[in-house]
Amino acid sequence: MPQVPAPRIIAQAPGRPTAETHGASDIWPKWTASYRQYVNQEKSLWQEQFDALNFRD
């Protein structure tokens, strides 16, 4: 029977809190209305730049 390798032990960085110390209320949701607006603006700017590159043919 083949031996199973021992699980890797990853040391915690000093001074860094563990994930369990943060409550669920401390975590901000990523897709807030303002973040979605920011992403849409960035996509719009990228699309304008891409279209400008294609227009220079």
Image (spheres, rainbow, N blue to C red):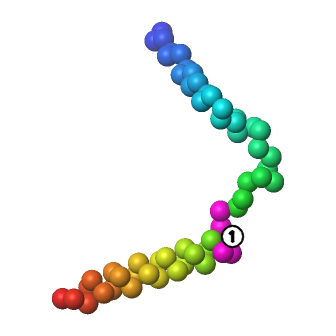
Residue 49 position (above or below residue 29): below
Residue drawn at x 49%, y 16% is 5
Along the line of sight, which residue is nearer the eye, 1 or 34? 34
The vertical placement of 32 against 2, above or below, is below
- Residue at 65%, 35% (x, y): give it: 16
Residue 51: percent from left, percent from top: 33, 86
Q: Name the residue beneath numbered marker 1.
A: 32
Magenta part of the chain: 30-34
Q: Is residue 27 left or right of residue 11?
A: right
Q: Residue at x 66, y 32 (%)?
A: 15
Q: Residue at x 49, y 76 (%)?
A: 42
Disc 1 element: loop
In the displayed structure image, the side of residue 35 where residue 45 appears, left or right: left
Q: Is residue 31 magenta?
A: yes
Residue 36 placement (x, y as % from top left): 61, 74
Residue 14 in the image, given as x and y percentages of width and height: 62, 28
Magenta span contains residue 3: no
Q: Quadrant of residue 19?
A: top right
